[in-house]
Amino acid sequence: MTVEAAPAGIAEDYEQERPARRLTGLPRHLVWTASGLLSIYALVVVFRPTAVLQYRITFLAVALPLTFLAYRSGLRLARVRKSKLSTAAERAEKGEEKGEQKGERKSQRETEKDAGERTASPRADSPGILDWLLAAASVAVLVYPLLDFDAFVTRGPEPTSTDLAMGIGLTLLLLEATRRTVGWALPAICVAFLLYGYFGAYIPIGWEIGHRGYDLSSLVDHLYMGTEGFFGVPLDVAATYIVLFTIYGAVLDLSGASRFFIDVSFAAFRKSRTAPGRTVTTAGFLLGTVSGSGVATTVSLGSVSWPILRRAGYPPEQAGGVMAAGGIGAILSPPTLGAAAFIIAELLRVSYLKVLLYALVPTILYYVGVFLAIEIDARRLKTKATDVKAPPFWRLLLRFGYHFSSLLLIVMLMAIGRSPFQAVVIATVVAFALSFLDPEHRMTPPRLWRALVQGSLGVLPVTAVCAVAGIIVGVVTLTGLGLKMSDIMVSIAGGNLGLTALFAALAIWILGLAVPVTASFIIAAVVVAPALTGLGVAPPEAYMFVFYYAVLSEVSPPTALAAVAAAAITGGDAFKTMMMAWRYTLPAFLVPFAFVLTDNGAALLWLAPWPQVLLATAISIVAVAALAVVTGRWLVGPARWPERVLCAVAAVLLLYLEPIPVVTGLCLLGLAVAVHLALRRKQA
């Protein structure tokens, strides 16, 4: 059993953050050279620090031009995605009609044909004159501040005409780069914030969001010539945490870790009817340490696991739901969470290790919910055990278990006081050294260079998003919009924390339908989180609440990209696959409310003594199990509506984590079991 290549282009076509060109010839050599050097620069700065603002500007001065060369304009992207989805669905249907083996051979031939078509005309995918001009303009507007850095910073309150021109130019370039990488929605939101900052004085008197208005000089000073705008915390996170972890993930991937993680997952759950579903979920958790992307993890899983899930009896929609749930869970899970988690560490001024602790118990609850859903579906769908050809588990673990060592090393180094930057660089070096234990995946110089290149190329979309998000952060801090929106939200909710949390969740969910996870978190952190902290919620709990809802938008209908990518592989209905993925992850949507609605919820983030943490975790696991009964429509036999209603109410009360609601919830859960047994006995 080995990892196969993902279907050509599916990850690129369905993942908003990676619709990149397939460069050839001179453009490819230039982009790869600049990307590799950028990775080396980021690694060197870890041990030879430079001035923070200068480093951020320099990093962006290389990353932004690369974005214009590596990414298409994207104007035809929507049509391509729709075409790919239709082609994948038709391909899967044909494969089913002609038999599994023949269908798989046909799919492989068509995949190779697609790949050939993609590379048949490299000129059509090469950067054009406009792309080169935009890249050159990017270099100009970002090198300009570095020419006389001290003077540039000190004259901020009174920018010159050249400063204004360069600031406006950078704004337009970042908006275009973001449009290319993640679509129109985020640039449109940023433009709306700019208009709000400029025309605030024209907002009618009496409107709470009104302000005195800021002219062009004030906006350029705040966004371009300081550390509250383009060169703020989000860009710093992209240029430090994210690029280093992306390089580490590339080294792990190329050293054979991806193959090992999937192989060991299949070997661990080989002889059970729930084994295929459990394997996909476990492999998703492990693969997430390499990819850091929900869609990429889903596609990697799907290319290997869909034939096995199909043989086990999973319909396409259920199989796609399992893949999407397993893929997106990786972003929620230590030790390498999504990009937003690094921003949490910077906003709270805490170590990344502490953020990992925040995520530990919620991760356990997430996977408990998914595993229970898999168990329920295996019974309801009457799936069967599938024989998977894989080496014995212990043999795999003894031979390739060293791939886990660098992951553990990151946590250990941070625990003894090393910075996360140094920890991940040391772990990268260890992963590189250990690769020579596997002759097939040893990190030779060409493979090492490829890892460095992939590290920088992988961070380009996030860099564009983080830099342009500086517009939102800058305008919010300049105008005080965050506190104003907080007051409005709390006022609408009547000062009720529960309603405020519900409105916040809905706002983040709607925002996540249009923009990527990182951008969704940044916007919500400055606009939505203050509403929670204003009602007494501690900042860690508020930010983790925002983080989880930003991530879960990836599996939320109607634009769940991970589920759409899974449907493209299985040939299932895209919307039904979204609904299945949403059902598998539903408990994760309710658990974050426990963070903010009660003081005891802090225990779920490890912000309490360990006995309280263990008790809160145990109660929450029972609550998640009750929710699984509700969403899965199964207990021991078919669950009727009385049991499901009782379990739903019990789960909500248990997640409140206060003594009286918990006791009441346990009583209701016991009553649900008694009713079920009585009805089952009566039916028998």
Image (cartoon, rainbow, N blue to C red):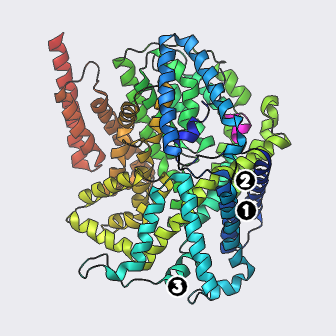
Nearer-the-camera pick, 631 or 140? 140
Q: Residue at x 45, y 20 (%)?
A: 274
Q: Nearer the viewer, residue 293 or 264?
A: 293
- Does 458 sit above or below residue 391? below
Q: Residue at left 48%, top 52%? A: 516
Q: Position of residue 122 (x, y in %)?
A: 71, 41
- The numbered mark at residue 217 is 3
Of badges 1 and 3, nearer the viewer stands: 3
Q: Is residue 379 above or below residue 554?
A: above
Question: x, y (%) of residue 628?
Answer: 33, 32
Disc 2 to disc 3, C-alpha distance:
41 Å
The earlier-in-sequence mark between 1 and 3 is: 1
Query: In the rendered structure, does residue 620 fall within the stretch colored magenta?
Result: no
Residue 376 in the figure: left or right of residue 277: left
Q: What residue is disc 2 on?
A: 425
Label 1 vs label 3: CA separation?
Answer: 35 Å
| Kind of residue sitting beneath label 3 | Ser
Q: Secondary structure at mark 3?
A: helix
Residue hosting label 1: 46
The spot of residue 497 in percent (x, y) is: 26, 60
Count neighbours of disc 2 (C-alpha within 10 A) and say few if under 14, some if 14 to 19, many if 20 or more: many
Type of the residue with mark 2:
Val
Seen at 75% across and 44% down, the residue is: 24
